[in-house]
Amino acid sequence: MSYKDQLKQLFPSIIYDEETDLEEYVFINPKEIVEISKSLKSLHFNLILEFGIENFKNQKGITLIYVFEKADYRKLLIIQSKINNNAESIAQIYPTAVLYEREMQDGFGIEFNHSFDTRKLFLHEYYPEGFHPLKKSFTNAHLKLKGKVSPSEDYFFKKINGEGVYEISVGPIHAGIIAPGHFRFNVIGETILNLEIRHFWKHRGIEKSAENKTPEEGVVFAESICGDETIANTLAYCIAIEKISGIKVSKRAEHLRVLCAEMERIYSLLGDIAGMIVDVAYPMGASQFFNLREEILRWNERLTGSRFCKGMLIIGGVSKDVNSKTLDELEEYLNYFYSQFTSSFLKILENASVLDRFETTGIIKESLVKPLNLTGPLARASGVNKDERICHPYAKTYEQIMNPNKILNQGDVLSRFRIKANTIKNSANIILRIIKNMPKGEMSVNYDIKDGCSFSIVESSRGQNIMFINIKNKKIDRFKVRTASFCNWYAIEHAVMGNIVPDFPLINKSLNLSYEGNDL
Amino acid sequence: MNNLPSQIIAPKAKKNRDDEELKRLHLELKRSISSVFGRSIALREVDTGSDGSPEIELVNLTNPYYDIEQYGITFVASPRHADVLIVTGPVTCNMITPLRKAYEATPSPKWVIALGDDACGSGIFKDSYAVIGSVDKVIPVDVKIPGDPPTPIEIIKGLLKLIRKIGKEGY
């Protein structure tokens, strides 16, 4: 018996909707969402996304969509609930829901009853009152912002009182070449008692900006979500559009897509590894990895014409082919890369002062992974085997050539360092196998855009990215993306507790989450 | 696969076509920074809503390939230590106030570089509700370096343009 049948037995009011190879859609009565969430939790389903959409499937008003995932079940359970500007919060059952609900409160003006946090999320103080950008009644244009903000409108941070407790506030602009974000520490002596993060300084309005664009125009918005997840997000976008319109990509194009995705994973994670070594004051060790990263970026330019592979992926395939001579040279380079990387990595692990800083620092417990929906290398360093390339294989290529991932249980900075190194080696192996088995075929296929909606899930360098696209009248009607960073950011509030303030940059770098992918 | 002979005798990293140009740019940097700024110039980066790739390229400027620090360019931790602000991104509504504060905190004489298409005003978000549109709508800009994102070589050329401009106009 499928899970939706089990639910139907418990809640007879559930109405079945369409079913695809990734999704099972059902409609529910909005009053029952809390009870349904409780049953799903007891069935070990996890909430991975919650968002709103206006005038969905010709129903006037707002529909809430909840996306549930289960570890050993390949399909997503999609629950649709039609509401009137007011809904019951499920944050008591699934803690991550509070973020999605705050997001919808800003975007659509929906009120959530019994929510434990109703502060604004991505619209900061200077936005006018009663402004909700995702409503269809608002046409995207520049706003008249508030001139002044009174102290009563300031964002509220948790206050901790007591003898010797003091506050450190950091940001939004940090001391480094890095994106803006605000961190509020409560510290006693040198030990961190509590950390609260406030983001969305970089909120650019991607979701609204992509609306009413043709699917082809939408590609650049997917590329701009996050610089070092360009291919991951564009791949998710193309897969969703191709699913809606029934476009079949050639085998060669799929192999080239995966090749770029793995190149991106390598340079992105190399940056993390180098950054972690810099943060323990060992720049000489880091420069080996910076060198390799630069070489990979140059290879990207050679393969795709852009150091970040921008413009490579298009709907229906890829925009450039790679000739066999270049592939042979890439193979030769990657063999060199593999041996260089392995020897540099082993040298770092021989260094006692590095290990001293890495070990037992910034522990993320395994028990946090599911409630916070943590994914990617950081989940694999905390004992959970989560990799969308295996859980939801979005390219046939991965099913054939993936090596099993390494899993570690300690959840500290050292584990994340090792897991990221292992992921890089795995990616290099994947590319080498792709080059060996590169099939012949056309770069892209002709297609017609059809109306409809679809989800897609990919594994970016930081974990699970999920995207939803609804096409209406051959234009984008709703573009919803949730990157891994949106959930993973909250791991840091737990990881730093009990650590000393000087270890915060190291812990932050070991997670290396994206600000732009979170803020959108 | 580690034991194959081809991996033990690793091929040398390929010489890049940029190398000659880079050598020339490095020399020029050193010469112009010495004559205009008396040996060194301090940069402070402010991200106001880029997609993150300009930051990656700025970090890359300090890697062993480009290594601009040895020619007298440093990235500093605070605007109070900076000669030049490098601003990336279309300036989101949430970042207008922090950007103004950073500019006011930078001691005079000071200069501003807008880096990337978004910051220059030609990016895809220029009409979004959540942004102002370009850096020069908030603070005065001296040099624009367009690109999505500009490559390290283009950034070095942009820096040279600014230094030459200051050399000509004085401060």
Image: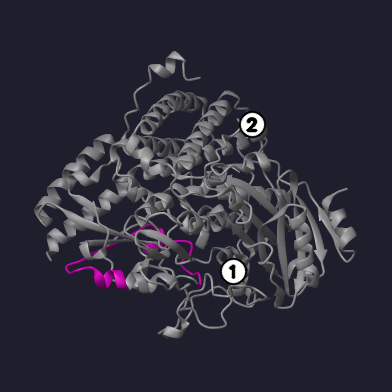
- Residue A348: assigned label: none
Report the residue marked by disc 1.
Answer: A103
B54 lies above or below B14: below
Q: Is residue A320 visible?
A: no
Task: Look at the image and give the residue range highlighted in magenta.
Answer: B101-129
Q: Nearer the viewer, residue B105 or B160?
A: B105
Q: Quadrant of residue A101?
A: bottom right
A177 lies above or below B49: above
Relative image position of residue A369 (x, y in whole percent): 60, 51
Report the residue marked by disc 2.
Answer: A441
Q: Quadrant of residue A61?
A: bottom right
Chain under disc 2 = A
Give the side of residue B7 with respect to residue A53, left or right: left
| Three-letter amino acid code at the position of disc 2 | Gly
- Mark 2, residues whose alpha carbon is within 10 Å: few (<14), some, or many (≥20)? few
Q: Which of marks 2 and 1 is nearer the N terminus?
A: 1
| Three-letter amino acid code at the position of disc 1 | Glu
Callout 2: SS: loop
Closest to the camera, between mark 2 and mark 1, is 1
Relative image position of residue A519 (x, y in whole percent): 50, 63
